[in-house]
Image: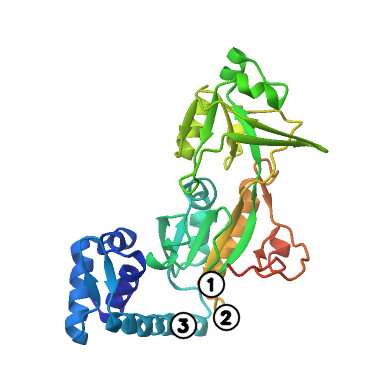
Amino acid sequence: MDRIRRLEILVSAAQAGSFARAAKLLQLDPSAVSHAIAQLERELKVTLFYRTTRQLRLTEDGGEVLRRGLGILREVGERDEIGARVQERVAGTLRIGMHVPISHSVVMPRLPELMRRHPDLGLECRVLNQVKDFHAAGLDILLRVGEPPQSDLIAYKLGELKMGVYAAPSYLARAGTPESPEELIRHRCLVHHPPQMDKPWDQWEFQRGTEHRSVTVPQTLVTDDREGLIAAACAGGGLMRIGMFDPRLIASGSLRRVLPDWTCPDGPALYAIYRRSGRLSRKIAAFRDFAVEAFADFDPEEITTSRSRAVPERPRRATLQGAGVLASRRAGRNRKI
């Protein structure tokens, strides 16, 4: 293992707060992480971490090594990118984090096209959705659902999920179709509890023109497993309010939207997140543009998603980068997060 790799492991361990978590993010054995840190300590003749059973904390020397190591890794990455630019090709390894529905429905079905377009580009894909894991996992770009927290990263808006209430035809044939939001309290409701939220999403909001309704629905089923929730709904388990990723479930008739005259406001946004730099890496730019195309093509009728439009916006404390249809993808809104 070379020193650059050991520095990468040091950064991951420091940001993850434990060798075990760093090993999981890096897909290494915990002993390999511990060995790499020990070897780096021997080479540098310093102690990098205070180790206890409950906490892993950098020493003063460790903090200085971390700071210098980040600079070295950044310089190495820039040199690699310069080499790729000189050869006018997208090359190297791109580490991508993705939310599971984005991976399954949007990116993976189109990934062979990206590989053909850039044969010298290697890809490492991880199932991650949290910005806090971005640095620790050594990601280059993260595709995620939901507003990102404040950080020094760039968030490039790809679009938004359209929220709606769905059920299988078998459930509606058995229980009837609700004609108003208020009727939902008499139905079996499947409620999503996102892991990052304090409580389940049992407060369902609806809007029709100037009318607004807010209904607290029965929690027949509560789960943080989004895909499991959809599977239960397709099997006739009840009604769910969700932002769908797969329009084929609706087009095939597996699910039917109820209360179609009402819209569900505040659908979560989808972002591509990457580091801020003077010049955007060619491999990151290539994947970001590919993601824009993939989102545009997987739901062309915008049944379950709406793509970000290039809308002028007054400067704010934070700026947002947005991507609409492919023709306007360079004119989006910028946001520092």
The disc placed on residue 69 is: none
The amino acid beneath tag 2 is: Arg
The amino acid beneath tag 1 is: Asp
Q: What is the crowding at mark 3: few (fewer than 14 residues within 10 Å), some, or many (at least 20)?
A: some
Where residue 48 sits, quadrant-wise, is bottom left
Q: Earlier in the sequence, mark 3 or mark 1?
A: 3
Return the x and y of residue 331 as percentages of the image width and height: 72, 68
Q: What is the crowding at mark 2: few (fewer than 14 residues within 10 Å), some, or many (at least 20)?
A: few
Q: Is residue 161 left or right of residue 228?
A: right
Q: Mark 1 highlights which residue? A: 152
The amino acid beneath tag 3 is: Glu
Return the x and y of residue 61 as percentages of the image width and height: 28, 84
Can you say which quadrant of the picture contains the C terminus? bottom right
Q: CA distance from mark 2 to mark 1?
A: 15 Å
Return the x and y of residue 79 as percentages of the image width and height: 44, 85
The disc placed on residue 279 is: 2
Residue 287 appears in the figure: no
- At 27% from the left and 67% from the top, the residue drawn is 56
Q: Mark 3 highlights which residue? A: 78
Can you say which quadrant of the picture contains the N terminus? bottom left
Return the x and y of residue 224 as percentages of the image width and height: 45, 39
